[in-house]
Image (cartoon, rainbow, N blue to C red):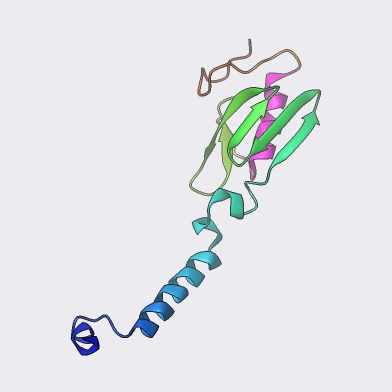
Amino acid sequence: MGRARRGLGWGTRREVVRGLLASAAAVLAVPGCLPTGLTGTGAAFDETYRGRRIRGTGSRVTVDGRPLHLMRRADGTWLSMVDHYCSYPTPLEAARAAVDELGPAGRLPLTEGGLHGVHA
């Protein structure tokens, strides 16, 4: 049966396993192929910045308990619904920039993905 598989280009089980391991190693060697939580950009954070509580894990970020919608750009940087003209290397830096843009009295909308740039 092994010879029949060879005719179809399968090879032995050992060769197939080696091929799978080599493919997995290649994927792990390229940071962009990893899930966000494994690349370092998805590190959890919880801090107070300019009097605002910023919490997040990966792209799920809240400012004072309200969701801040973040989007990942093709180049790996992040932008927020508050300031979608600038991009930042990490979700935390994007959240800090959103706090800077909101100012001391601005609040995010209660619904995720709400109006862009709402400062009420």
Q: Is residue 5 above or below residue 61?
A: below
Query: Which quadrant of the figure contains the N terminus?
Result: bottom left
Q: Residue 81's spot in the image, x, y percent?
A: 55, 27
Q: Which residues are magenta?
A: 88-103
Q: Residue 37's spot in the image, x, y percent?
A: 60, 49
| Quarter location, residue 14 | bottom left
8 left or right, relative to 56: left
Residue at the far top: name it.
120
Q: Is residue 120 above or below residue 28?
A: above
Task: Reply yes or no: does residue 89 show up in magenta.
Answer: yes
Residue at the far bottom: name it.
3
Q: Residue 99's spot in the image, x, y percent?
A: 71, 25
84 left or right, relative to 11: right
Task: Reply yes or no: does residue 59 show up in magenta.
Answer: no
Identify which residue, 33 or 37, lies in the foreground.
37
Q: Is residue 53 above or below residue 32?
A: above
The majority secondary structure of the magenta stretch comes to helix
Identify which residue, 92 or 57, lies in the foreground.
57
Q: Total marks drawn?
A: 0
Q: Residue at x 63, y 14 (%)?
A: 119
Query: Which quadrant of the figure contains the C terminus?
Result: top right
Q: Residue 4's spot in the image, x, y percent?
A: 18, 86
Identify which residue, 60 or 30, lies in the foreground.
60
| Quarter location, residue 68 | top right
Q: Residue at x 52, y 56 (%)?
A: 32
| Quarter location, residue 47 | top right
